[in-house]
Image (cartoon, rainbow, N blue to C red):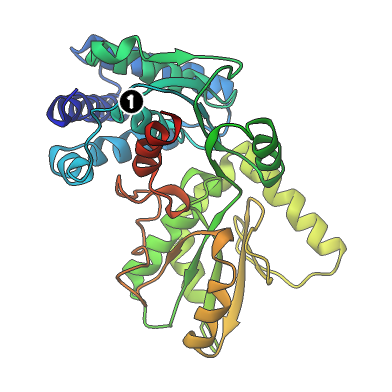
Amino acid sequence: MQNQRKIEILSSLGKLFLQASNVLKKGKESDHELVNKLVEQTALAKQQNSWFTDSSIQTAFNAWGNALNLDNLNAWLKAYDFDIEQKKVGVIMAGNIPLVGLHDALSVLISGHELHAKLSSKDRVLMESVLFILGEIGEEWKSKIKLVEQLKEIDALIATGSDNSARYFEYYFRNQKKLIRKNRTSIAVLDGNESKEQLEGLAKDVFTYFGLGCRNVTKVYIPEGFDKDRLFEAFFSWKEIINHNKYANNYDYNKAVYMLNKVELIENGFLLLKEDENLHSPVGVLFYETYADWEVLKDKLSSREEEIQTIVSHLNEATHTPFGKAQTPELWDYADSVDTLAFLQEVYKKTI
């Protein structure tokens, strides 16, 4: 299948996502049967995973709808030629945020391979619905989409999970070519010159999806003398997040544990700000650390790059993510900075 046809399919999917998002926002049924089918599934998805809300699902639909436009798709696929022999590629998907496994699924299909998808129990409803719709839009892909419980006789694997599951995947699939992603998180680096709008963008990077994604900021580095009240002022518009039951339970639990251990905290009723050298903060908590010299900090962060998904900052526009954009990566902003499409090209070369 030539790239132009693939672009047409994905562009149609993108338009469908935007329509579904609009239906969720306005509560008005669409004229498009597939749009209505997807919207109907959101209610079941919320029952399946109470971290999924109308707002978070709508955010995911918007992100995918905006990403899958013609300009982005042409820019993404222009460097690849996938007229290759089909192989069976297994994908073990995460389910921490809505449709987090979709990029891998699309990459496998774009590359001409057969998708063997092991869906997460946390995001089964939405992913099943989207993959069904994808087969309806691009009928030539329908026979290439397999939903499986066990990955048998595959030629390659893409897997996302914890550090512990990664070790299991490495062993169990030791004879297959594989791309295995471990547990990562994202950080922000401030220099004190950020505008109010940039700090409000940082709030999106912290709170979107309740902070559960690998692209959520869980640690912020601030210069010595930085006024932390500026953070709380920028974060205030997210105060309603505490009304979500699971978030509130996490917030209350972590606050209680820290207080019992006499840990010094700054808090505003919906976020705990804790000074900590770790990068991965629990839900309801944002770690922070002060620094005196950016060049010294840069060296420190480079030694931990395998723990970091992205850095939100304006200190290096070439490599850092702008404030407020952590959860809207470009199609070519690959997880763990590993080019998934290049890996899938190699699947053919390594197995012939």
Residue 167 percent coordinates (x, y)? 70, 42
**Badge 1 element:** helix
For the point 57% across and 26% down, the residue is 120
Label 1 sits on residue: 109
Residue 238 percent coordinates (x, y)? 47, 53
For the point 17% across and 43% down, the residue is 78
Which sits in the foreground, 57 or 92? 92
- Residue with the most extreme front position: 352
The answer to whether residue 206 is above or below residue 136 is: below
The answer to whether residue 206 is above or below residue 48 is: below
User: Would residue 307 appear left or right of 134 to someone viewing this image?
Assistant: right
Which sits in the foreground, 261 or 186? 186
- Residue 132: image quadrant is top left
- Residue 204: image quadrant is bottom left
Q: Residues within 10 Å of mark 1 (few under 14, many from 20)?
A: some
Asked whether residue 205 appears in the rendered view, the answer is: yes
User: Would residue 7 appear left or right of 259 to someone viewing this image?
Assistant: left
The answer to whether residue 134 is above or below residue 253 is: above
Residue 10 percent coordinates (x, y)? 23, 28
Which sits in the foreground, 305 or 57? 305
Quarter of the image for the N terminus: give it: top left
Quarter of the image for the C terminus: give it: top left
Which sits in the foreground, 56 or 168? 168
Residue 19 percent coordinates (x, y)? 23, 26
Count of marks placed on residues? 1
Asked whether residue 36 appears in the rendered view, the answer is: no
* Mark 1 residue type: Leu
